[in-house]
Image (cartoon, rainbow, N blue to C red):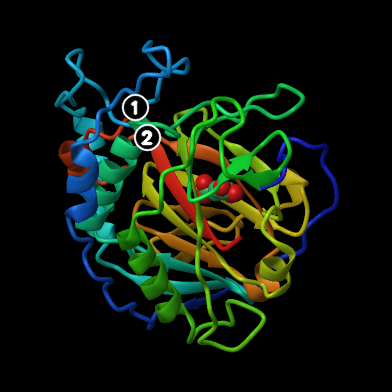
Amino acid sequence: MENPHSPSQNSIDGGHRTSLTNHHPVTPSTLSSSSVDAVENKKSMKKDDCGSEAKTKPFDICTPKPSGGVSVLKPSLFAVNRGKRNEMKQSSKEIVLLRPGMVLLKGYISITDQVKIVKVCRELGLGDGGFYQPDYDDKTTLHLKMMCLGKNWDPQTNKYVDQRPSDGSVPPKIPPEFLTLVHSALEDSHSVTRLSNSKPPFTFLPDICIVNFYSQKGRLGLHQDKAESKPSLSAGLPVVSFSIGNSAEFLYGDGRDVDKANKVVLESGDVDKANKVVLESGDVLIFGGKARNVFHGVSAIKPDSSPISLITDTNLRNPGRLNLTFRQY
Ligand SMILES: O=C(O)CCC(=O)C(=O)O
């Protein structure tokens, strides 16, 4: 991910979009609870070498109780109704080809797996290398909280490093269950388009996962993901993105000019001429091959749009959206 706050440039032509409503992805295997259990026992606050609490207070993606657990807040009636609608929409799974190399799997991740992902991310996010507020080198702040798994992406240099420069923390490992889901999503998308520059099956070994958490004002300017290694980029190895929680307005195109970016409205699979993708909880977006260098970003978060059982089972913040992008260095 490069600095998405750089000046605007270029324009974007309309993308090639086809809705393949007859493609029903194989339901991915449910995540085992071992990751959840493994991190459930972790202490949520680490001490530094001097025995005092770590300098940066870890960010809790769930609404915390004063005692440190998770409080069970009653969602508003509006949130309940909208959440129920979103949960029902999840039953309409489909694969949508946005442009060659770019595929959207609607409602791919089951609610059970979404709950597990939130719980794992919460626990990892409270520990060493957990969620923090990233800044660019010009001191502009990204409008999100971030946690890196596998390798740390440094926004100051746009490079991957083994430790986070601001606090020396080592990124947690990517839970293997997350990778199982990544691979099943790829397998289910191969029939639709080529997701790398070579024919499937190609070797894709994701060793990086950037986890972003957006609150109501969260956003991410149009940018390309180009910090991965030259071999990975030239092979067009894909970026696989999971969306969980509130829906997000997602833009993509060939340049940084938001006004000219492709915006496709895809609520439950309807392709709208307005050109805006709404990424909903459980959606998986993949871009590789010809689309590997697509400009992409998040322009808005829609509060009260999370599936209701996700909120009641996890207390994920609302407004709140979790996004995980898997890449191979
Ligand atoms: O939140 C999203 O959907 C996009 C995230 C993204 O573009 C990135 O992490 O590079």
Q: Which three-letter amino acid code belongs to the residue tagged 1?
A: Asp
In the image, residue 193 sits, relative to residue 257, either above or below, namely below
In the image, residue 246 sits, relative to residue 328, either above or below, namely above
User: Disc 2 designates what residue?
Assistant: 125
In terms of depth relative to the viewer, which is nearer, 78 or 29?
A: 29
Rendered image: mark on residue 60: 1
Asked whether mark 1 and ligand 1 are closer than 8 Å, the reply comes as no
Q: Residue at x 54, y 30 (%)?
A: 168
Residue 223 spot, x, y in % from top left: 70, 48
Res 120 quadrant in image = top left
Residue 72 spot, x, y in % from top left: 14, 26
- Count neighbours of disc 2 (C-alpha within 10 A) and say few if under 14, some if 14 to 19, many if 20 or more: many
Residue 233 spot, x, y in % from top left: 70, 67
Mark 1 and mark 2 residues within 8 Å of each other at the beta carbon: yes
- Count neighbours of disc 1 (C-alpha within 10 A) and say few if under 14, some if 14 to 19, many if 20 or more: many
Rendered image: mark on residue 17: none
Q: Residue at x 51, y 27 (%)?
A: 217
Q: Left or right of 68: which side holds 208?
A: right
State whether residue 33 appears in this view.
Answer: yes
Q: Residue at x 74, y 28 (%)?
A: 137
Label 2, secondary structure: give it: helix
